[in-house]
Image (cartoon, helix red, strand yellow):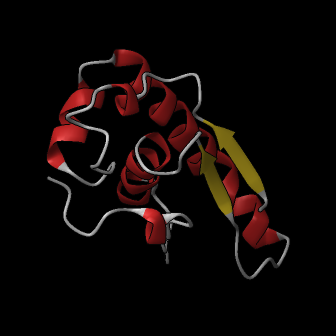
Amino acid sequence: TDMLFDARFLPNPYYDPALRPWTGKDQNVKDFFEKYPEVDEFCTDIGQFLNRWAHQYEKDHRQCLSISVGCTGGQHRSVYLAEKLGRDVNTHNITVRHRDAHHWPANPT
């Protein structure tokens, strides 16, 4: 990982039993995060940082730049932020992968 952003300080939907089985890709979890301005502000700050500095890695002839977003369980906060950054960062060839995706339930109920 070239850059790591820690999201553990953000509100955690894990503590809501109705949201616990879902992920940051699910609309109900997205709706949860959209109620908290600090989530959007943190994501905006990361996006601005990446938009400003990622090109320097290209100038240094780096083939890829690995950016990680971490949280406690790898299911809610980091997933939401990684997906949002993948859409919002103004650079090319972005691939979003979720390391802990294999731990998620197939059909939360």
Task: Give the percent coordinates (x, y) of residue 103.
Answer: 46, 65
Task: Please tell me in which quadrant of the rendered image residue 70 appears.
Answer: top right
**Is 50 on the left or on the right of 78, as rendered?**
right
Whether 14 is drawn above or below 105: the answer is: above
**Seen from this angle, which residue lies furthest bottom?**
63
Near-viewer residue (11 or 50): 11
Task: Give the percent coordinates (x, y) of residue 35.
Answer: 24, 19
Quadrant housing the N terminus: bottom right
**Is 17 on the left or on the right of 61, as rendered?**
left
**Is 37 on the left or on the right of 54, as rendered?**
left
Residue at the spot 56% in from the left edge and 67% down from the top edge: 99
**Seen from this angle, which residue lies furthest right?**
60
Whether 88 is drawn above or below 104: the answer is: above
Task: Give the percent coordinates (x, y) of residue 107.
Answer: 19, 65
Near-viewer residue (61 or 4): 4
Whether 14 is drawn above or below 99: the answer is: above
Q: From where the camera sits, is residue 69 visible?
A: yes
Q: From where the camera sits, is residue 96 visible?
A: no
Residue at the spot 53% in from the left edge and 63% down from the top edge: 100
Task: Please tell me in which quadrant of the rendered image residue 7 appears.
Answer: top right
Residue at the spot 74% in from the left edge and 82% down from the top edge: 63
Residue at the spot 49% in from the left edge and 74% down from the top edge: 95
Near-viewer residue (13 or 82): 13
Task: Give the percent coordinates (x, y) of residue 48.
Answer: 54, 39
Q: How many numbered marks does the figure carry? A: 0
